[in-house]
Image (cartoon, rainbow, N blue to C red):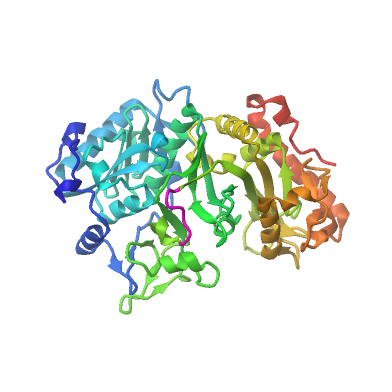
């Protein structure tokens, strides 16, 4: 493996250790090491199965950005981006480096964040766990053999799950810490074995760097049609982002994180990170097939200790069980992880209030408004007595990963939409005919959503008659071949139209209240795109 050791080593970075350093191991070697070190077991069909302990998802409240001259005026400080004092980071770094020095083994991977060469960032990841190193190698973009020799990291991630932070000494909340230093280009992750923290840290780096280059970073999926038309799908969890972008007739660029440059939509990653809970061959056949491949890593999936068969319906380890696999495990994936600039943008929402239409066409100003809003809604819970859905607003459809002020991303989007003459759509995959909590109310038929989406993407929807929604001001198709017209106008789908009007007024007010924090950061035309109760 000597030929996979770069000339620029840890010593060149000022990182000293007595550990045996395993450089840029390939998948089989990392799987062997993980098993040898009792980090996981092989399932019957080949995947590596691991457990992450008490942390089965992101530790959002334990993530910090160092507040210094670089970030004081460039980061959007608040509940999402919490500040760490440089002195606390210095103490944390000192303790991390002491841990590194005393390790017996370390696994190091040199990788790219971003598939478009001119916009990627060189990332070096140092792990104590072999399976973590396999995970991040799977999820990021892998350099070629020849690129490794001259690899020089721009950013370094040190990931030590066994490290325990000291809140008093390190200026954090608990023994878990994710600390990002944009000045030193160093990210320290300790006290959690959840591998997704590494992936999201790279997403955060690119979200910070790319806007200064005029590149739009996006928490979205993306695919390409047979005519070379790229579509971008924004949406929060549960809205259908992965399902709707996985279309056998279109080529997948990626399922989660992308950049939009002057010349391309490019995947930040070289792999996928899919939810595994209640996965079925019938509903998601392509993802299901990855669970039978050597090289897939399954987190918190229950496995029979004798037969090594998997049980995707058992949530005893985690509701957020995950699988990571190279993107080329998915048939019809883009070989370059890139596609042309978008022709269509789809913003997905699952409206549990039953107010929004199944599809609407947005102006650039409306698109920016809804992008900054990042709205979806869910049924508030399953407990007895729940009578109201719960609105969720996540700015830019990915607030936890956006270091800069949302208006920066919103204005970038608006500019790119105008420049590329992009058509924007709002698609509601939620409920119709009433609130989700009302008896007999069901979700939007997937068949209707698919038909409307296909019509939007192939251009045929542009030729039908549209009417203006009286509350939200966007254009809604009046009639579409093969779709029940009653579905298209949500008010008509309600038996009690007065109740619809009251619900719509309440939702409009929630939008207005949520947008108040952005009012001073957007153009007047975007403010005018706000909904107004009929």
Tell me which residue sits at (44%, 62%) in the image: 318
Q: Is residue 164 visible?
A: no
Q: Is residue 410 left or right of residue 154?
A: right
* Residue 464 coordinates in the image, percent (x, y): 80, 51
Q: Is residue 194 left or right of residue 250?
A: left
* Residue 195 coordinates in the image, percent (x, y): 36, 52
Tell me the quarter of the picture where residue 305 sits.
bottom left
* Residue 204 coordinates in the image, percent (x, y): 44, 38
Taken as a whole, is the magenta stretch helix, strand or loop? loop
Q: Is residue 340 visible?
A: yes
Image quadrant containing the C terminus = top right
Q: Residue furthest front?
A: 227
Q: Residue furthest top?
A: 69
Tell me which residue sits at (17%, 47%) in the image: 3
> 122 or 404: nearer the eye?
122
User: In the figure, 71 relative to 6: above or below?
Assistant: above
Tell me the quarter of the picture where residue 47 sits.
bottom left
Q: Is residue 332 magenta?
A: yes
Q: Is residue 178 left or right of residue 217?
A: left
User: In the figure, 444 relative to 416: above or below?
Assistant: below
Q: Is residue 525 magenta?
A: no
Q: Residue furthest bottom?
A: 307
> 184 or 288: nearer the eye?
288
* Residue 109 coordinates in the image, percent (x, y): 27, 46
Tell me the quarter of the picture where residue 309 sits.
bottom left
> 389 or 330: nearer the eye?
330
Task: Report the magenta residues as a range.
Answer: 331-337
Question: Tag count in the figure?
Answer: 0
């Amino acid at each position: 493996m000597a030929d996979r050791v770069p000339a620029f080593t840890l010593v060149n970075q000022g990182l000293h250790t007595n550990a045996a350093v395993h450089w840029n191991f390939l998948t089989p070697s990392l799987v062997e090491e993980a098993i040898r070190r009792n980090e996981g077991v092989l399932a019957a069909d080949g995947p590596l199965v691991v457990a992450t302990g008490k942390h089965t998802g992101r530790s959002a409240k334990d993530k910090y950005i160092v507040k210094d001259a670089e970030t004081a005026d460039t980061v959007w400080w608040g509940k999402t981006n919490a500040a760490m004092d440089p002195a606390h980071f210095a103490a944390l770094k000192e303790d991390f480096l002491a841990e590194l020095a005393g390790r017996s083994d370390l696994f190091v991977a040199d990788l790219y964040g971003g598939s478009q060469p001119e916009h990627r960032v060189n990332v070096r990841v140092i792990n104590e766990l072999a399976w973590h190193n396999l995970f991040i190698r799977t999820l990021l973009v892998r350099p070629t053999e020849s690129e490794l020799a001259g690899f020089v990291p721009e950013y370094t991630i040190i990931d030590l799950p066994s490290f325990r932070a000291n809140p008093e000494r390190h200026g954090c909340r608990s023994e878990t810490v994710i600390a990002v230093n944009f000045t030193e280009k160093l990210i320290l992750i300790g006290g959690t074995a959840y591998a997704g923290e590494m992936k999201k840290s790279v997403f955060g780096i690119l979200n910070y760097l790319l806007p200064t280059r005029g590149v739009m970073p996006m928490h979205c999926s993306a695919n390409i049609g047979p005519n070379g038309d790229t579509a971008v799908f924004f949406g929060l969890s549960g809205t259908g982002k992965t399902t709707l972008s996985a279309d056998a007739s279109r080529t997948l660029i990626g399922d989660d994180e992308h950049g939009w440059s002057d010349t391309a939509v490019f995947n930040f990653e070289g792999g996928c990170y899919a939810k595994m809970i209640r996965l079925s061959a019938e509903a998601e056949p392509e993802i299901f097939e990855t669970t039978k491949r050597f090289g897939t890593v399954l987190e918190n999936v229950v496995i029979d200790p004798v037969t090594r068969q998997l049980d995707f319906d058992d949530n005893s380890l985690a509701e957020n069980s995950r699988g990571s696999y190279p993107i080329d495990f998915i048939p019809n994936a883009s070989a370059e992880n890139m596609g042309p600039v978008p022709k269509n943008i789809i913003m997905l929402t699952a409206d549990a209030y039953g107010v929004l239409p199944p599809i609407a066409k947005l102006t650039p100003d409306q698109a920016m408004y809804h992008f900054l809003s990042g709205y979806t809604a869910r049924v508030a819970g399953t407990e007895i007595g729940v009578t109201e859905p719960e609105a969720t607003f996540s700015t830019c459809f990915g607030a936890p990963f956006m270091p800069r002020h949302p208006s920066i991303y919103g204005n970038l989007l608006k500019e790119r939409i105008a420049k590329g003459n992009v058509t924007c759509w709002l698609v509601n995959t939620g409920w119709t005919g009433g609130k989700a909590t009302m008896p007999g109310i069901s979700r939007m038929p997937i068949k209707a959503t698919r038909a409307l989406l296909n019509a939007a993407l192939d251009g045929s929807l542009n030729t039908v008659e549209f009417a203006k929604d009286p509350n939200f001001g966007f254009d809604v198709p009046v009639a579409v071949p093969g779709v029940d017209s009653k579905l298209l106008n949500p008010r008509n789908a309600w038996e009690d139209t007065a109740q619809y009007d009251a619900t719509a007024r309440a939702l409009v007010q929630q939008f207005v209240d949520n947008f108040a924090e952005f009012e001073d950061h957007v153009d007047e035309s975007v403010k005018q795109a706000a909904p107004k109760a009929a």
